[in-house]
Amino acid sequence: MLSSNKLNYIEGVQKHAKRVATTTIVLSVIVLTILIIIHTIINHRKLADIIYNPFFSVIVLILSFFFFILYRGKQRALKLQKLIEQMSEEEFLFLLQIQSSLSFHYKYAPTFVLCCEQLYLFTPFKIKNIDPKKAEKVRWHYARGGSLLVEIQSPETTKFEVYNSVYPYFTSLIEMYNPNADIEKYE
């Protein structure tokens, strides 16, 4: 049985996933409507002629991109929910500490999670599993939007984006599991 805090967090993750899906759908409808209207006005065509036009393939590509975003958001939310269900109470409390340093929009979309002493990194295209005991080197670079691009060298190199307010939590986590790791501090 899950604790009420975990259930509340999972509910927040599900609500966040619904907001992302709704926003993506609304944006896709707006963008596609604007493109279709502009195309029909500029080319003086009827709406039925669009299907036989190369412009239609552009619309299909844009729709595919939006569906990909929806799919990734759903997969991410499901994986995060499963990880939360498997977390120990200490790991979940650590997640709540991280959550407290994030703004409203990112509280339910962490970039990394500790579960069963494994580190899960949520990169844009996949969820990567790393053993924090094997992390040898951690470096960061400024990225856009007030975040940092973090590079971790364990047996292989992994890059992912993390918010600058969360980076100290990340480094403390790596130091806890591997005190000998070479970690670049952010100040």
Image (tube, rainbow, N blue to C red):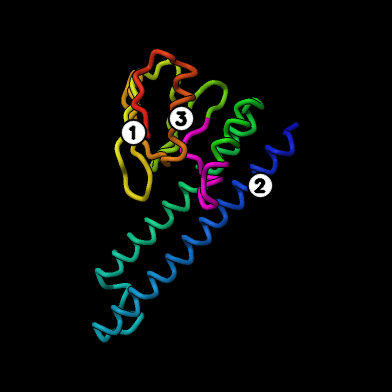
* Percent coordinates x, y for residue 171 in the rendering: 43, 27
For the record, the magenta segment spans 100-113
Disc sitting over residue 159 in the figure? 1
- Tags 3 and 1 in contact by the CB under 8 Å rule? no
Question: Image quadrant of residue 98?
Answer: top right
Q: Residue at x 41, y 51 (%)?
A: 68
Given the image, on which type of amino acid does mark 1 rest?
Lys
The answer to which of 9 and 93 lies nearer the viewer is: 93
Q: Return the x and y of residue 65 as percentages of the image width and height.
A: 37, 56
Residue 31 at what x, y percent from top left?
Answer: 38, 69
Left or right, 4 with respect to 118, comes to right
Looking at the image, is mark 2 or mark 3 earlier in the sequence?
2
In the rendered image, is residue 79 in sight? no
Q: Nearer the viewer, mark 3 or mark 1?
A: 3
Above or below: residue 120 compared with residue 25: above
Classify mark 3: helix, strand or loop.
Answer: helix
Mark 1 → mark 2, Cα distance in angstroms: 29 Å
Q: Which mark is residue 11?
A: 2
State how far apart marks 3 and 1 are (Cα): 13 Å
Asked if residue 2 is among those painted magenta in the image, a careful observer would answer no
| Badge nearest the viewer, 2 or 3 | 3
The disc labelled 3 sits on which kind of residue? Phe
Task: Estimate the spatial distance between the alpha carbons at disc 2 and disc 3, rounded to whole Å.
Answer: 24 Å
Earlier residue among tags 1 and 2 = 2
- For the N terminus, the image quarter is top right
Q: Secondary structure at mark 2?
A: helix
Q: Are marks 1 and 2 in contact (CB under 8 Å)?
A: no
Report the residue that reaches farthest toward the front: 187
Residue 160 in view in this figure = yes
Q: Quadrant of residue 175?
A: top left
Image position of 127 (left or right of 144): right
Q: Which residue is mark 3?
A: 170
